[in-house]
Image (cartoon, rainbow, N blue to C red):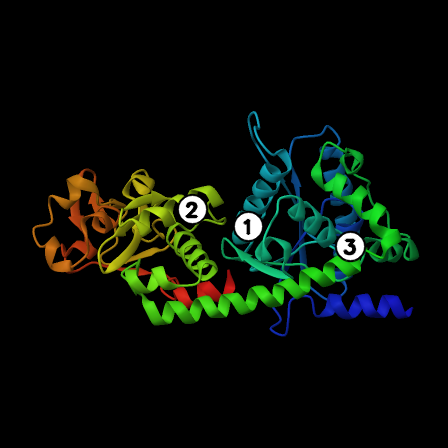
Amino acid sequence: MSTQDAFLHHFAEHAFGLDRPGKVGVAVSGGGDSMAVLHLLTKFWDVEAVTVDHRLRAEAAEEAEFVAASCAKLGVPHHVLVWRHGKITGNLQDAARRARYDLIAKWAKRRGLAHVALGHTADDQAETFLMRLARQSGVDGLSGMKPRRKMAGITFHRPFLSFQRQELRSYLRRHDIAWIEDPSNADERFDRIKARRALAALAPLGIGPDELSGVAHNLQMERSALRHCTAAEFARIGAVDRGDLVFEARELARLHPEINRRLLIAALRWISEADYAPRAEALIKLQTAIRHGKSHTLHGCRILTQKKTVRITREARAVRDTECGTRQLWDGRWKLRGPHSRTLRVRALGAAGLAQCPDRKRSGLPRASLLASPGIWHDNNLVAAPLANMGDIWRAELAGNRDDFASFLLSH
């Protein structure tokens, strides 16, 4: 075995950390990077593979068949997921990427897989850095992709993020393993391909994938320090109150602008379960409203600004159509405990439900919070509203560690 093979095998063997999960997923497009990851991980892990057909290119179905045939030779179960979409407006690659992660996360949950490996390399990290540099991104954006990230309950791993693309393809050549070249990799309409060309132009200056990945790593360290500072400030001036976040208004205003910004973004994402932060312009409007003592709505949240406190809660309008059974998580975070029944549904309390809660004021929660709180319904009849003091037999709890905002600050 060559030294390079031994090095790659070491990373493959430890791809998912010290706690060895059972079966793991691998996202495989048929390109060189993902094919290398598939072959390397199969040597050490019980693997299932998944391919996403975005239905954007005629060749995609053939590429999925190629991956299926490769997996069959390896004895690896393989699944194809299809992105069924209509007309796509806006950033095509961004929309496809979001859909891909969503489809893979749902697939992993169905298959009982908690971990999925991706084929990103140092080249991808460097290209991402350049694209975000063009958008004038700050520390968070320029710190690039993380080696692992949890989304929708699934941990996505990038075990070969420190390797260049050519190293993985050299591995494939040494072992006579075929792969497919995606024709869109030469399409300069896409920002990533433009970044790839720019990266080649920067090579004479000594600026390559390793150097830019190193910069991204340094910025990740700085981002981590900022997260710890933000968490420390929250412990000083904030608290979790039954799914809401409450801050001391005066102390929130006194925070360093960057810490204030981070705290508000994290609060909005934590309550709304959103994967992304609001746009910078929208956040500035929110900060201005708070500064002038005005309440505001943003990112599926209602921000209640009072003299002494700033409370961030769920926006009632954002959850008015959210419905599920009593055994399921409502709005992605509320777990209901009580006499479950298939005839019962969980919906937002809303104005009609709140009117049926005579003891609602004893809860101490403002009207806006209660409107967006979970209610247990039988058809159109309210059975219980745990946060509004109706129906002692039912309880509403934040599921898992969703009540731990400090941990969220340190990990997002």
Can you tell which quarter of the image residue 216 is in? bottom right
Q: Nearer the viewer, mark 2 or mark 1?
A: 2
Q: Secondary structure at mark 3?
A: helix
Identify which amino acid the numbered label 1 is placed on: Ala
User: Few, some or many C-alpha atoms within 10 Å of disc 3 (few <14, some 14-19, many ≥20)?
Assistant: some
* In-image side of 267 versus 177 (left or right): left
Q: Nearer the viewer, residue 62 or 349?
A: 349
Q: Nearer the viewer, residue 270 or 349?
A: 270
Residue depicted at 74% across the width and 65% down the height: 12
Identify which amino acid the numbered label 2 is placed on: Ile
Identify which amino acid the numbered label 3 is placed on: Leu
Number of numbered discs visible in the structure rendering: 3
Identify the residue under disc 3: 74
Residue depicted at 29% across the width and 60% down the height: 249
Q: Secondary structure at mark 1?
A: helix
Q: Are marks 3 and 2 in contact (CB under 8 Å)?
A: no
Identify the residue under disc 2: 284
